Amino acid sequence: RVNKTGGNVPSGNYNINDSISDQAENVPFKMYGNGPYISVDTYGTTAPTTYTGSFNVEICADDGTGLPDGGWVERTVNLESIFNLDQPSQPDLTGSQPWSWMFGADLQFTTTRTYRMPGGSMIIPVEGASIRFTAPASGSFAMTFNASFDLGFNSKTGSVNQGVLDFTTDPVHVWTLITSTLVVGMNRPVLDLFLVPGQSYVFNIRNDAPNPASNQIKVECTVRVYS
């Protein structure tokens, strides 16, 4: 159960969510999935108004019937607070390219889909490329980026953040001979980064040892929509 203990965010301007659905304050609920993960989203009205809040989290065991056994113990867990969801501050994306520039189609968050380069691969600038996109206003999804190790190049570095050609701000991933992926998303507790609803981002990608004559790269992105 979660109780508000301080801050100036008024009742009705925040949601308590267990990664599956909203929960009422001070009412016991079960944790499912890969928890414990609880998000507390606070809503402002007019920028630059920012609400703050502190919350007490307690846990207890199941009594065997699906109800709490009453032995509540206070625990420290990760609480994610997102302020002013109505008016997110957008980053400067000058120098970035639209999603369709790399994948030949506009990005949609309505159904699960894998986006691939129309020609199988493409030439990008030696310094890399930045592909911009905006997270939806609501929903639950994951974005999984894969970069091919072939095409005669060594490792590749990718990132998802709000800086054009920013390869240092997490989450950052380096593709090598070992198959692995860069995963981000919104309202998915096991992911590397939680995207703010309505906020704009860039997917940055580069060859770590670029070939100025033909800097080919091969990338795909699978968007899995959960709700």
Image (cartoon, rainbow, N blue to C red):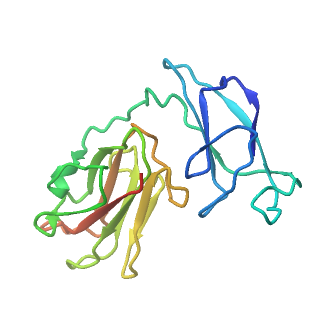
Where does residue 105 sit, x and y in percent of width and height? 16, 52
Which residue of the protein is positioned furthest toward the right in this rendering? Answer: 71
Q: How many tags in the picture?
A: 0
The answer to whether residue 139 is above or below residue 183 is above
Where does residue 86 sit, x and y in percent of width and height? 45, 27
Which residue of the protein is positioned furthest toward the front in this rendering? Answer: 65
Whether residue 51 sits left or right of residue 139 in the image: it is right
Looking at the image, which is closer to me, 74 or 215? 74
Which residue of the protein is positioned furthest toward the bottom in this rendering? Answer: 177
Identity of the residue drawn at 25% across and 76% down: 153
Whether residue 107 sits left or right of residue 183 in the image: it is left
Identity of the residue drawn at 38% across and 32% down: 90
Looking at the image, which is closer to me, 46 or 208? 46
Q: Quadrant of residue 201?
A: top left
The answer to whether residue 210 is above or below residue 31 is below
Where does residue 76 sit, x and y in percent of width and height? 77, 50
Where does residue 80 sit, x and y in percent of width and height? 61, 44
Q: Quadrant of residue 39?
A: top right
Evaluate whether residue 9 shows in this view: yes
The answer to whether residue 64 is above or below residue 9 is below
Looking at the image, which is closer to me, 53 or 95? 53
Evaluate whether residue 208 shows in this view: no
Identity of the residue drawn at 12% across and 67% down: 213
Q: Quadrant of residue 152?
A: bottom left
